[in-house]
């Protein structure tokens, strides 16, 4: 199973739990879970190398967004992520982190431009497919902080890296559809960026 597919499944699961957590009455169901979030026991089978292990401090943030803000994820990134650097799952953990930071915790609307720029540059270092709609929102938030030329350049850079990742996928109907959706998202969003 390829890393991109696994990462997308993990992201979808996190979103599902997050959506459930925001529903009325969710606290009655989730409060017992909040109290009992535990790391896996040593008897559990290990994850494949590219799949991040359970990280309770991150799970508490992304699974219970009402109790947290982007600042909690920012603190996790600064204090906890370095502990995982160099491990086989590190890039997928970053993908999961960036997805939740930009979609679930509204980085672009709530953080200052310096932090937004930091995270966009961190994402640009990775070879993966960004959520271009969210990425471009953050790029727009940097108008006046970055030049228009830099904003366009960053957009093109992450789009090109995403294409390279998608082109490595098996050439099947699903991959072709994914490529088309990615390209459409890019072209829809690039029109909104400053010239």
Image: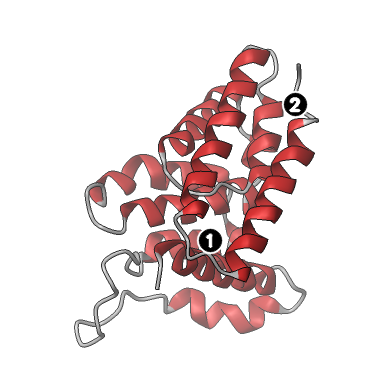
State the SS at label 2: loop
- For residue 193, the mark is 2
- The x, y position of residue 27, in whole percent, is 65, 76
Vertical placement of residue 108 versus 37, above or below: above
Density class for disc 1 (Cα within 10 Å; few <14, some 14-19, many ≥20) is: many
Q: Nearer the viewer, mark 1 or mark 2?
A: 2
Is 5 displayed left or right of 143 in the figure?
Answer: left
State the SS at label 1: helix
| Front residue (pair 157, 90) | 157
- For residue 62, the mark is 1
User: Which of pointers 1 and 2 lies earlier in the amino acid sequence?
Assistant: 1
Is 164 displayed left or right of 56 in the figure?
Answer: right
- The x, y position of residue 121, in whole percent, is 47, 30
Q: Would you identify the image quadrant in which residue 3 lies?
A: bottom left
Residue furthest bottom as drawn: 43
Vertical placement of residue 148 versus 26, above or below: above
Quarter placement of the C terminus: top right
Q: Would you identify the image quadrant in which residue 133 lies?
A: top right
Residue at horizontal 54 percent and vertical 26 percent from the top: 117
- The x, y position of residue 59, in whole percent, is 45, 65
- For residue 102, the mark is none
Residue at horizontal 56 percent and vertical 72 percent from the top: 13
Residue at horizontal 36 percent and vertical 39 percent from the top: 78
Give the Cα separation between the discs numbered 1 and 2: 29 Å
| Front residue (pair 106, 128) | 128
Residue furthest front as drawn: 171
Residue at horizontal 53 percent and vertical 61 percent from the top: 62
| Front residue (pair 63, 14) | 14
- The x, y position of residue 124, in whole percent, is 47, 34
Q: Would you identify the image quadrant in which residue 137 lies?
A: top right
């Amino acid at each position: 199973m390829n890393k991109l597919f696994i990462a997308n499944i993990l992201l979808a699961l996190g979103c599902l739990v997050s959506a459930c957590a925001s529903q009325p009455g969710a606290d009655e169901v989730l409060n017992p879970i909040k109290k009992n979030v535990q790391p896996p026991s040593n008897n559990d089978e290990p994850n494949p190398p590219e799949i991040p292990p359970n990280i309770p401090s991150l799970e508490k943030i992304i699974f219970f967004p009402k109790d947290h803000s982007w600042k909690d994820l920012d603190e996790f990134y600064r204090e906890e992520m370095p502990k995982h650097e160099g491990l086989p799952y590190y890039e997928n953990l970053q993908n999961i982190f960036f997805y939740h930071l930009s979609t679930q915790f509204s980085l672009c609307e709530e953080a200052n431009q310096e932090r937004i720029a930091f995270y966009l540059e961190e994402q640009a270092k990775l070879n993966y497919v960004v959520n271009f709609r969210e990425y471009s929102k953050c790029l727009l938030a940097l108008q006046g902080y970055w030049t228009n030329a830099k904003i366009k350049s960053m957009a093109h850079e992450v789009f090109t890296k995403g294409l390279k990742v998608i082109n490595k996928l098996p050439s099947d109907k699903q991959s072709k559809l994914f490529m088309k959706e990615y390209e459409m998202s890019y072209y829809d969003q690039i029109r909104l960026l400053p010239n």
